[in-house]
Image: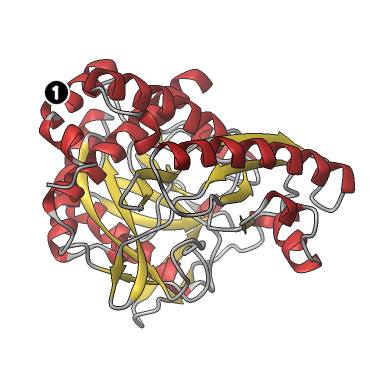
Amino acid sequence: MSIIAHPFVSNQPDVLHWLNSHLHTLPFYSSVDIRYAGFKIAVVDHNLFPAGFNNLSHIHRCQTVNAFQAAFNHYKVYGETVVLLCETHTRNTWYLENIRVLADLISAAGFQVMISMILPDIDTELECHTATFQTILIHPFHTLKHYDAIILNNDLTAGIPDSLANTSVPIIPSMQAGWHTRLKSEHFSMANQLIHTIANKLSVDPWLYSTLFDVADICSINDPESRVCLHQKAQALFASIQSKYTEYGIDQNPFIFLKSDHGTYGMGIQVIEHPDDILTLNRKSRNALSKGKSAKPIQRLLLQEGVPSIQTNNGKTAEACIYSVMNHCIGGFYRLHTHESRNNLNKTGMTFGPIDDMPSDVYQLHVTLAQVANVAAAHELVSMA
């Protein structure tokens, strides 16, 4: 058994019992990105509106149907028709394929599904083709009249539209879970508190299962004073990471990811190999950090410890994406890229592969860390209610 996995895996029933005893209602669905460096492992991102259901294997999709049935019962959604409200990505064929599969899974759980988008200027249904040449029908949300619940697959980065705010049926997940209110830094703060408590119970170092981070409010990455502030925070963070590397005899240089604290879709992310890199960011890099999804200006940045990945699949660097529906881990897959182990893999050129060959103890550790992240997210939602 992996040395790093042993404490958590050997005590997994007790750890999961402790987590479940603290909160019984986990997010409706979620995905987490996990990086495994050999000497440490950590969740590096958490999404409450996951895409990528098309990358799940047949077995994982079957598990998803059963989990959805239990989740709908928990939320007391007993009607016949649900609206799957999606991102306005009519030309992103892989996102549309994800939506097609997600709609099929919800349908298999016993519901009629209407796929919808916020399209205020369109009054008729749209016929769109997915990446696998399947056809889906998209209903402009304002044209829909009769339905029993709304399932959000839209992270509401731009805020809550009036047409959604005025809806009287159940909306799952909560609209407050969107990136218009949610912060990555708040999530990792809560998750690290949980990891710290569990690690103390297991007599292990919580750093081995989490990332160090800091956050900065800025005017703009293009503002010199803002970059000086970021540089100072990066210096302190690099020093903290180096201290842990020295403690464990890790013969590597620390690095960090600079990303939007509200961000998603892998946008607005830069790898920083040295604090001084922030002072010398070129125009292209600054542009990437200046605006996020929906061209929303980025004025709050997360500085997060980078975790190099030793996982590979098909000759590519890999990181695991683990999916859950409430209390059920339904499986996952590898995100793959030709980039080296210290880079962001969630960008153009990425592919996906099965996680079937992951050692069972390492997989169990991934599942446990995903559950920790979900409990942290649940605490976030409670605090925002």
Number of numbered discs overlaid on the protein picture: 1
Q: Is residue 279 visible?
A: yes
Image-based side of 353 in relation to 47, left or right: left
| Outermost bottom residue | 133
**Disc 1: CA contacts within 10 A as few (<14), some (14-19) or many (>=20):** few
Residue 111 in the image, given as x and y percentages of width and height = 24, 49
Q: Nearer the viewer, residue 250 or 351?
A: 250
Name the residue rendered at 28%, 30% in the picture. Answer: 75
Per the image, label 1 sits on a secondary structure element best described as helix
Query: Where residue 91 appears, x then y in whole percent?
Result: 54, 74
Which of the colour schemes (rainbow, by chain, secondary structure, one colour) is used?
Answer: secondary structure
Relative to 233, 51 lies left or right: left
> Does residue 385 show up?
no
Residue 123, compared with residue 135, is above or below; it is above
Q: Nearer the viewer, residue 173 or 342?
A: 342
Camera-side residue of 175 and 114: 175
Residue 144, compared with residue 242, is above or below; it is below
Q: What residue is shown with label 1?
A: 14
Residue 258: % across, % down = 63, 50
Q: What's the residue type where badge 1 is placed?
A: Asp
The residue lying at 18 percent from left, 32 percent from top is 7
Q: Is residue 69 left or right of residue 211?
A: left
Residue at the location (22% across, 16% down)?
21
> x%, y% of residue 138?
45, 64
The furthest residue to the right = 224
